[in-house]
Amino acid sequence: MIAIIKYNAGNISSVQNALIRLGYDSIITDNSNEIINAEKVILPGVGEASSAMKHLKGRGLDEAILNVQQPLLGICLGLQLMCDFTEEGSTNCLSIFNTQVKKFPPKDKVPHIGWNSFSSKKGGLLEGINLEDDVYYVHSYYAEISDETVATCNYIQPFSAVMQKNNFYATQFHPEKSADIGEQILKNFLEL
Amino acid sequence: MLKKRIIPCLDIKDGRTVKGINFVDIRDAGDPIELAKKYVKQGADELVFLDITATIENRSTLIELVKKIATEINIPFTVGGGINSVADVAKLIKAGADKVSINSSAVKTPQLIADISKEFGSQCVVVAIDTKYESGEWKVFVHGGRTPTQLKTLEWAKEIERLGAGEILLTSMNNDGTKKGFALDITNQVSKAVNIPIIASGGAGTKADFKVVFKKTSDTGALSASIFHYGEISIPVLKEYLKTEKIETR
């Protein structure tokens, strides 16, 4: 069973729908035990950082996430919440990845919305994916590149597209909305 | 590199896709799910579903349809038509819509933009502007273009950005249905006035119209309904053409 962490009002059913298309059972839950005991965990990405962190902490889900031993995938805001700090609402986050999340400077249109390719990548989640393959982004904040960055994308400046540390994985883009390429990336995670 | 988006729009009435010109001679064009899946397969970058009746009776039909779309397609989609409150948005988002598009209700109650943005994030708020050039000015129209307002398009666009919208869908009524190309003048003006992405709509008739709007404006997306529905231009052919014209698409 895959646990999808429920933490606010946004559209998290899209992650579940993607898992159904791939033939995986999942539950949407904010129960720490269910999260810790799931085969895989997904921290989906919608909403605003400070209220999302507050929500996670209020239910003890921050502790639960840090205690997860099995593969966990953060998506979009999920990736940002796994970093040290985000400028969005000046929020201290989970500190899984040692990097900062900043707002894009207004040198081009913000949010970064649409399909973008990779400027660099290592294996892992992106096994079988090419640099020129496009995935769907929608975000105004980005994680600075760090040692845990395993793929980068370039919009206004290079930023972390995929991050990984031990069993913790994260994508800034939405694999669940990235057509066949996104399904391949989700499959790579689910088959870890 | 960020790609330019090709976005087919499907008009929905009572849960079915309809085709019609200027809301006249509306004919059933089949199952929206089948058409949506076809567009996804062809490489559409996003989809927009516009409920053109949007009466209270058919809201539940629309919600059921959105649920089905969300299970069937794996690219982002926007739902518009008849959205008047945060509660309306909550139902659509819960059913699986990625974004909502609001128009007349935003003009009537601009605070709605801020309220939706705060609750669901600015990325899910698309504000549609129907604009028309009249007596030397671009003005905003509502109710499917039937009702003029006092709002000037550029000022309204800035206000929409200030209130927290994530994107603007800009339709020029002067161009809509003409097949003579997108309205470059107002599209450029709006694009320069705000820093959020603009999707151009209205007037596409040829492949070259897409090239021109992408080359001559900073638009990140272009929307059309009829040319895709009637098969005048297919998405793969359009994208191939744009590639040869050095416009990056997916």
Image (cartoon, coloured by chain):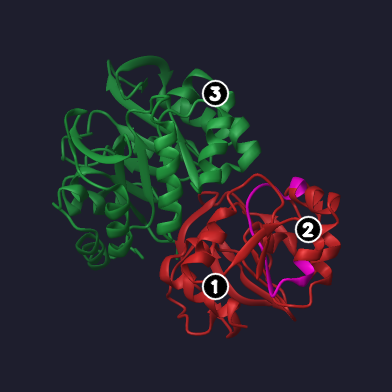
Chain colours: A red, B green
For disc 3, the marked residue is B110
Of the two numbered discs 1 and 2 on the same chain, state the one appearing first in sequence: 2
Q: CA distance from mark 2 to mark 3?
A: 38 Å
Q: Which marked residue is nearer to the observer: mark 1 or mark 3?
A: 1
Front-most of residues A172 and B191: A172
Q: Residue B112: horizontal and vertical position, in percent? A: 57, 27
Q: Chain of mark 1?
A: A
User: Magenta stretch: residue A45 in it?
Assistant: yes
Front-most of residues B236 and A65: A65
Q: Chain of mark 2?
A: A
Instruction: Kindly identify the amino acid type of the residue bearing the numbered disc 3.
Output: Pro
Tell me if residue B60 comes above or below residue A81 in the rendering: above
Residue A31 shows which numbered tag?
2
Residue A110 shows which numbered tag?
none
Residue at 27% in and 48% down: B31
Instruction: Kindly identify the amino acid type of the residue bearing the numbered disc 1.
Output: Leu
Front-most of residues B232 and A89: B232
**Quarter holding residue B203:** top left
Mark 3, Cα crowd under 10 Å, few <14 / some 14-19 / many 20+, is some
For disc 1, the marked residue is A186
Mark 2, Cα crowd under 10 Å, few <14 / some 14-19 / many 20+, is some
